[in-house]
Image (spheres, rainbow, N blue to C red):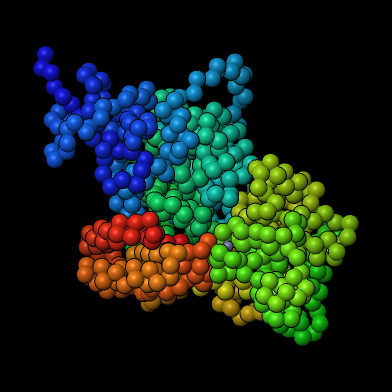
Amino acid sequence: MAVEKRYVEVLLPLKLKDTLSYRLPQGWPVEEGSWVQVPLRGHPALGVVLQVRDSAPVGVNLSAIEPVDAVLDIPAASVQERCFWRAIADYYLCTPGEVLKAAFNAGIQKQMLQPPKARKSKKKAEEAPLADLATLSDAQQAALDQIRAGFAQHKPVLLHGVTGSGKTEIYLHLAAEQLRQGRDVLYLVPEIAISQQLEQRLAAVFGPQLLVYHSRTTVPQRYRVMDTLRRDPTPRIVLGTRSAVFLPFRRLGLAVVDEEHDRSYKQDDTAPRYNGRDAVLMLAGLHKADVLLGSATPSCEALYNVQIRKFSAAQLPCRYYGGASASVEIIDMAQALRLHNVEGSFSRKLLKEMTAVLEAGKQVLVFRSRRAYAPVVQCEVCGEVVQCPHCNVALSYHRFNNSLSCHYCGYHRPYTLRCPACDEVALVERGSGTEKLEEELRTAFPGRTVARFDADTTQSKTAEEKMIRDFAAGRIDILVGTQMITKGFDFERLALVAVVSGDSLFAVQDFRSDERAYQLLTQLMGRSGRRGEPGRLVIQTFQPDHPVLQRLLQPEALSSDASEASAGLLAERQAFAYPPYVRLIALTVKDRYEGRVWNVCRLIQEAAASIGIRDIAGPTSPAVDVVAGEHIAQFWIKLPRDRRLAATKQALYARIDRIERDFKGHTTLIIDVDPA
Ligand code: ADP
Ligand code: ZN
């Protein structure tokens, strides 16, 4: 027997540019995709074999090559899995190692290296009989036929259906069909829409075939989901948030992305800065799986793809239980103030409507995009606005713990009335966040139960679930909350949704802000008046003529061609060369020294010019230009969507990577493809 030396190229979950070479002890069974434990700077690390070679790698000091510690007893990563990592890295301009790290976080890596003892399988509980699928209405059946027609042409399908139209039941029918045929299903929802209600419905229909995977799933639970998918041939349906796209599906038959327009599909704090919806499209491509995107307010990107016939479309124009959609009322706050019709943050008109709703035994939801008691505190003597010492932003006052806190870096300190600038005891709170609204509502409606649903009150999953249960059961009359209240909940007694300060939705400087405001208000509209009763949305604003509000007033007939509805929005994007007509890349530069920020920016401009990038805006300072002691500058690069796109992106990545190395340890450079 020939004594051959074998080597493997191993991918590690690190920001390394390349794989690392290791030696393979005699006779160890390894193939491409095998999971291994390898030494890394003296510590055991998880890796995956990307290549097995019979000869030594060239140009490497052979004596420095260490042997693989162990081959792990985990079924090898499939070709699709490995191709997917590569595709994500190429598209989002990061290394495959960073993708691996996103797919397998530190906790999971540890479990893969030291698998927990298989838990004694509980005595097989009497398997509960599964619930039947609902019989579809004619409208649902028609939509299902449209979807199937799209799938038959191998196209992803956009299901444009108003809130409450019964999209979920359609997803379930398609999912059941795939499972019967032995294929897996991925059912993706936005982070904040993971609802008990949905989970229970899926569990009732699919029983043990359902696996759940989201940010609140613990590490051991996540590990078990992965392990089950790798080892157990039973077809599964996975209900998950964006990171579920990295699960080791074996034969994915269908991927559903509900609320495809939702911003929380985008991962924006660490590389890969991917969008879960777009990642699903890549994944499904590798598995030749069907993709169904659902939304009541589709993204411009999805509508564009329907327009160019890359996607097929289906519609569900009516609510399942019928009934008119919510009526919308816009209250002109300037006028209300002139007429002295305002008490605190609320117009009298809104308070009156709330009273009527409560007296009828119904519930009210109050939306405000800012949490805290007051977004700003200011000195009445010198005018100073109290700032975060580490960020260029005002501190918010939280009454529940009497603190001033920074929503950017987490800095907080006790609140005193003393001005840090002039030392007078003269600080006053300005503006009103959710906490203040809660207090005002308690005063305005004594005897009613008022609760608040925001990041401060829902830190634990139990607290969050309890509040949802309490609201659903009618134990809460008025719920005040942030964006978190906008999705996924189906409350029967909710009759009125109030937006206290509509203007804060339009104040954002972003080409997507109008689209977002419209989507948010439409979602809110959909929250009220379910089960056949019309709901009501009341918006207080100083800009009653704002185009977004005017659009909301015209009940948008879901035309047979989904792209027609948003033709205006798309035309605007085209005219000003915004996505989806161009590829947008945001580049962020951060450094403790402002001077170095601008130096690096100059190098970036030179690099961009040298590879022929013409459309580069910046450097500009973002609205909050110092965060946690670092100065921030940004560039916006627009690339034409032509055949050179992929190559230009890679050239840009190489240059940026080079600059980052030169300033390593000082300057942080962040590349964000398709920023949200
Ligand atoms: P969407 O996801 O489009 O907002 P849902 O799927 O939540 O809408 O459906 C709205 C309501 O209609 C839910 O209460 C759901 O149980 C009910 N529903 C939808 N389709 C059916 C059906 N075919 N049979 C019975 N109830 C249905
Ligand atoms: Zn701060």
Nearest the camera: 488 or 62?
Answer: 62
User: Which of the pair 177/113 is nearer the observer?
Assistant: 113
- Tell me: 632 left or right of 493: left
Query: As drawn, which residue projects farthest toward the top?
Result: 1
* Residue sitting at the far front: 423
Image coordinates for residue 131, horizontal then vertical, percent = 60, 32
Q: Position of residue 162 (x, y in %)?
A: 57, 58
Q: Residue at x 33, y 60 (%)?
A: 663
Q: Is residue 38 visible?
A: yes
Where residue 62 sits in the image (x, y, percent)? 17, 32
Can I make out residue 577 in this image? no
Quarter of the N terminus within the rendering = top left
Residue at the spot 40% in from the left edge and 72% down from the top edge: 595
Q: Quadrant for residue 404, please give it.
A: bottom right
**Could you tell whether 11 is left or right of 117 in the image?**
left
Q: Which image quarter: residue 454? A: bottom right
| Residue in view at x 33 percent, y 35 percent | 40
